């Protein structure tokens, strides 16, 4: 079946379907005659599973791990429940905080925000989070992705530099340049691939799918 039919069956936008394909969560066959994607009933079932988990706000990375058999569904949902319980407690505290302000009859022109900010700081020290958890999580994921990618790029760059030093710096019979380039190509390819993966990861984290996928 074609993507328009899949979009109608699963009620997922073509944009998200394409995104899930880019992320490796879906791999439809290609029609050899026209190279169009041909979606199977199994692809539809996979999209339904993805939709279910995304509606529960399960991250793409964890869905991928479950598909690869690296993470049991029970473990994933167990951790997710803990996260939701923590968020529920934070929401209850924020609700209580709003109630205090309402009972005090606060008005925007006369409200002493500094008093409440100090109270918030005390509550935050006790573990309550008033900030947007999604934004905080976004920054954390971006930082981790950048660090991991940078480490790989630097390591591969050092490997190429070491190879060059061994080839021309200490060798009595230097390797021809074209041979050096051939042997260095796999390392350079890893650097390029890492940069591409980092770019896609940044796009995902920045909100292209993370927020779009919640609009089912």
Image: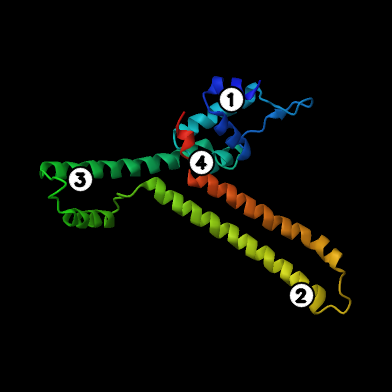
Q: Are marks 2 and 3 in contact (CB under 8 Å)?
A: no
Q: CA distance from mark 2 to mark 3?
A: 63 Å
Sequence-wise, which precedes: disc 2 or disc 3? 3
Sequence-wise, which precedes: disc 2 or disc 1? 1
Q: Residue drawn 71% across and 27% down?
A: 36
Picture quadrant where residue 29 is located:
top right
Per the image, the residue denoted by label 3 is 97
Q: CA distance from mark 2 to mark 1?
A: 53 Å
Q: Nearer the viewer, mark 3 or mark 1?
A: 3
| Residue 61 in sight in this render | yes
Count of labels in the image: 4
Image position of 147 with respect to 138: above or below: below
Please state the horizontal and vertical placement of residue 150, each as a whole percent of the image: 59, 61
Per the image, the residue denoted by label 4 is 208
Sequence-wise, which precedes: disc 3 or disc 4? 3
Left or right: residue 45 compared with residue 170: left
Q: Nearer the viewer, mark 2 or mark 1?
A: 2
Q: Are marks 2 and 1 in contact (CB under 8 Å)?
A: no
Q: Residue drawn 63% across and 54% down?
A: 195
Q: CA distance from mark 4 to mark 2?
A: 43 Å
Per the image, the residue denoted by label 1 is 45
Please state the horizontal and vertical placement of residue 10, each as a whole percent of the image: 54, 23
Q: CA distance from mark 3 to mark 4?
A: 33 Å
Picture quadrant where residue 152 is located:
bottom right
The quarter of the rendered structure image containing the N terminus is: top right
Q: Nearer the viewer, mark 4 or mark 1?
A: 4
Please state the horizontal and vertical placement of residue 210, each as a whole percent of the image: 48, 40
Sequence-wise, which precedes: disc 3 or disc 1? 1
């Amino acid at each position: 079946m074609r993507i328009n039919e899949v979009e109608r069956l699963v009620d997922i936008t073509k944009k998200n379907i394409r995104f899930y394909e880019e992320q490796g969560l879906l791999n439809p066959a290609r029609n050899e005659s026209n190279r169009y994607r041909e979606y199977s009933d199994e692809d539809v079932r996979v999209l339904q599973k993805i939709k279910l988990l995304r509606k529960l706000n399960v991250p793409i990375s964890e869905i991928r791990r479950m598909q690869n058999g690296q993470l049991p569904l029970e473990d994933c949902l167990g951790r997710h429940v803990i996260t939701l319980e923590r968020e529920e407690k934070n929401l209850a505290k924020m609700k209580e905080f709003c109630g205090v302000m309402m009972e005090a009859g606060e008005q925007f022109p006369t409200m002493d925000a500094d008093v409440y900010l100090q109270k918030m700081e005390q509550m935050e020290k006790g573990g309550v989070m008033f900030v947007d958890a999604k934004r905080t999580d976004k920054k954390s994921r971006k930082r981790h992705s950048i660090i991991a990618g940078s480490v790989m790029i630097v390591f591969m760059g050092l490997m190429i530099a070491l190879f060059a030093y061994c080839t021309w710096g200490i060798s009595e019979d230097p390797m021809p340049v074209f041979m050096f380039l051939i042997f260095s190509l796999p390392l350079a390819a890893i650097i390029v691939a890492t940069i591409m993966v980092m770019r896609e990861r940044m796009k995902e984290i920045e909100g292209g799918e993370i927020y779009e996928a919640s609009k089912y």
